Amino acid sequence: MSDKRFVLTNPDDQSSVELPLISGSVGPSAVDIGALYKKHGIFTYDPGFVSTASCSSAITYIDGEQGILLYRGYPVEQLAEKSSFLEVTYLLLKGELPTKPELESFTHTIQYHTMIKETLKYFFRGFHHDAHPMSMLSSVVSSLSAFYHDTTDIYDPVDRDMFAWRIIAKMPTIAAAAYKHNIGQPFIYPRNDLDYCSNLLHMFFSVPAEPYQIDPVAAEALDLLFILHADHEQNASTSTVRLAGSSGTNPYAAIAAGISALWGPAHGGANEAVLEMLAEIGSVKEIDKYIARAKDKNDSFRLMGFGHRVYKNYDPRAKIIRQMCHKVLEKLGKQDDPLLELALRLEEIALKDDYFVEKKLYPNVDFYSGIIYKALGIPTNMFTVMFAIARSVGWVAHWQEMLSDPAMRIGRPRQVYTGAPHRDYQPISKR
C-alpha cells in the first residue's frame, strides 16, 4: 500500500474523505474502500464489478487497452510459441518456470493421477444420453469430494497440492467420459505414455475395435488452445471459484461452481455460440444481410466471437490462435467445409469493414477456438468443456493463492436496497 491518498468530496456539505491507494507492480492503482461504510455509512456501487478490484493477485495481468496478457509476468505470446500446457500449468501454480527435472517430475505426477475411480464411471449412467456435457462435468467434479474426502483439508498444503494434481489430471478423463456417454461408446482409459493433449484425443476418439492414430497437429493445436485459455485474471468463473472457496467449502465444490459459471454463453459458452451463429447464417451468400443486421441497433442479432469485455484492442490470444486455425484447416483439409468456409469469409470481412474496425470488434479467441474444435471433430456441445479443462488450471492457482492470503475473508458483496420500506403485516381479511 502506498502513502498516496484518494480524496472524495461530498457536494452537499463539502466534507472530504481520504482513502488509501493500493498500487500493483503494473497497471492502475485501486482505492481501498474497506473502511468506507464503517466510518462514513456509505457503500460503493459498481454493477458487474467492472471497476472493482476484489483481491490482489500475482498470477495474471491484463492491459485491455494495449492488448497485453501476462502469465506470472511472461507475455502469453512467448509462452504460446516456446512453452507447453503443462509447463504453463506449473508456472501458474508455482509462480516460476520449472527446471527440466521439475517439469519431468510434475508431468509424471499429473500422468499418475489421470484415472478416475471405477465406481465413479457408474455415475454417468444416471444421466440421460443427450445430457449436456457441462452438466455432467459440473456434477462429476463436485462428486469427487465424496471419493477424496480424506484429502480435502484446505489448510493443509499437502492436501492442496494433491487436489491440484488430481483435478488437472482427471478433468480430461471426465470430459472424455461425458463425450463417450453422449455418443453411446465405451469409456476409454487414459494412457500415461502420452502427453496431456494427445491423451485427451486418445480418450475422445479411439475405440476398442481398432487402433487410433493421433494427429500431432491436432495435439499441438489443443496444447496451444489450452495455454491461451489457462487463465484470464478475475473473470466470472474465476471470481466464482474464489467466492465459493472463500466460504471454506471443499475445493471440488468450488471448481464445480466455476464450471457452472463458465457454462454461460457470455463467458465460456461463447465459442459454442459462434458455431450456432454460423449455422444460423448458413451460407456465404447471407453474410452481407447478417452484417447489416449486426449494425442495426434495433435488431437483436449479434455477431458472436467479435470484440471483448476487457480488450479494447485486438485480443492478443486471437492473434496467436488465428495462425494455428489456418494451419489446422490446411493440414486436415477442412477448407471445403461450408461452415468453416463461412467463418473464414466472415473473418475476412470483419477485419476490413469500417464499422468493425472503428468499434474494434475484432475476432476474438472464442471465434477461432470454435473453428479449430469444429475442424478437429469435437462436437459443439463439448466446446465449453474443453475451455473448462484448460481454465481449471487458473481456477486452482487462484484458489491456492486466495487461501494463502492473510487478508482472505469470506466474500460478501453489499447492495443498494430498492424494495418496499418498513411495513407492518396485515391480516388476510384486511388486504
Image (cartoon, rainbow, N blue to C red):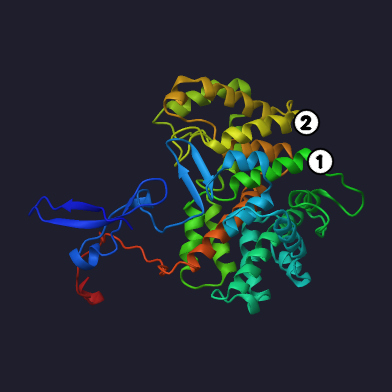
Q: Position of residue 426 (x, y in %)?
A: 21, 75
> Image quarter for residue 256?
bottom right
| Image vertical order of residue 335 relative to residue 55, above or below | above
Q: In the figure, is residue 295 to the left or right of 420?
A: right
| Image vertical order of residue 367 relative to residue 58, above or below | above
Q: Amino acid at mark 1?
A: Asp
| Image vertical order of residue 125 relative to residue 354, above or below | below
Q: Position of residue 117 (x, y in %)?
A: 76, 70
- Disc 2 is placed on an element classified as helix
Q: In the figure, is residue 50 to the left or right of 177?
A: left
For the question of whether residue 385 can be seen, the reply is no
> Image quarter for residue 338?
top right
Q: Identify the residue at image location x=46%, y=56%.
A: 57
Q: Quadrant of the N terminus?
A: bottom left
Residue at which label 2 appears:
331
The answer to whether the residues at label 1 and label 2 have Cβ atoms under 8 Å apart is yes
Label 2 Cα crowd, 10 Å radius (few <14 / some 14-19 / many 20+)? few
Q: Quadrant of the C terminus?
A: bottom left
Q: Amino acid at mark 2?
A: Lys
| Image vertical order of residue 74 relative to residue 101, above or below | above
- Disc 1 is placed on an element classified as loop
For the question of whether residue 423 can be seen, the reply is yes
The residues tagged by marks 1 and 2 sit, at their Cα atoms, a distance apart of 10 Å
Please state which of residues 75 and 340 is positioned toward the viewer in this rendering.
Answer: 75
Q: Identify the residue at image location x=44%, y=39%.
A: 64
Q: Position of residue 126 (x, y in %)?
A: 70, 66
Residue at which label 1 appears:
215
Residue furthest to the bottom in view is 150
> Image quarter for residue 286?
top right
Q: In the figure, is residue 247 to the left or right of 121?
A: left
